[in-house]
């Protein structure tokens, strides 16, 4: 289990699965944030920006996983993660 600002990551315990993250309510609004597995978090965030999205949280590295968060052009927030 690893910790990063606001998140705790847990290894789900089976081959090929991304670590699962849970974090406290941030900003006072209830929200659900899901993560999509990608090959390269930084490149994915760059591509999201090229398509009109906004990086909410740049790539962060914690033991075993790199993750980041972006918002699409309609404001939907999506996490992306890659195993290291």
Image (cartoon, rainbow, N blue to C red):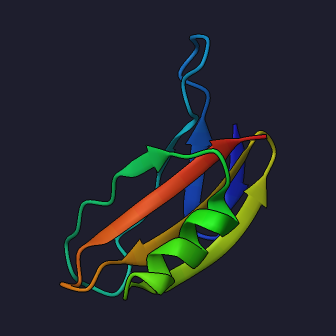
In the figure, 2 relative to 42: above or below?
above
Residue 12 is situated, as x and y percent measured from the top left of the image, at: 53, 22
At 56% from the left edge and 64% from the top edge, which residue is drawn? 44
Residue 11 is situated, as x and y percent measured from the top left of the image, at: 61, 27
The quarter of the picture where residue 43 lies is bottom right
Residue 81 is situated, as x and y percent measured from the top left of the image, at: 57, 50
The quarter of the picture where residue 71 lies is bottom left
Taking 50 as reference, is 42 left or right? right
At 32% from the left edge and 60% from the top edge, which residue is drawn? 33
Taking 79 as reference, is 29 left or right? left
Taking 22 as reference, is 12 left or right? right
Residue 42 is situated, as x and y percent measured from the top left of the image, at: 68, 67
At 43% from the left edge and 47% from the top edge, which residue is drawn? 36
Looking at the rendered image, the quarter that the C terminus falls into is top right
Q: Residue furthest top?
A: 14
Taking 61 as reference, is 23 left or right? left
In the figure, 24 relative to 53: above or below?
above
Looking at the rendered image, the quarter that the N terminus falls into is top right
In the figure, 39 relative to 55: above or below?
above
User: Which residue is more in the foreground, 21 or 66?
Assistant: 66
In the figure, 8 relative to 59: above or below?
above
User: Which residue is more in the foreground, 31 or 70?
Assistant: 70
User: Which residue is more in the foreground, 11 or 65?
Assistant: 65
Marks counted in the figure total 0
The quarter of the picture where residue 5 lies is bottom right
């Amino acid at each position: 289990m690893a910790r990063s600002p606001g998140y705790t990551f847990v290894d789900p315990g089976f081959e090929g699965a991304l670590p699962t993250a849970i974090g406290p309510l941030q900003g006072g609004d209830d929200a659900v944030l899901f993560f999509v597995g990608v090959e390269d978090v930084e490149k994915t965030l760059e591509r999201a920006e090229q398509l009109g999205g906004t990086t909410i949280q740049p790539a962060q590295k914690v033991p075993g996983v790199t993750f980041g968060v972006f918002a699409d052009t309609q404001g939907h927030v999506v996490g992306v993660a890659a195993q290291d």
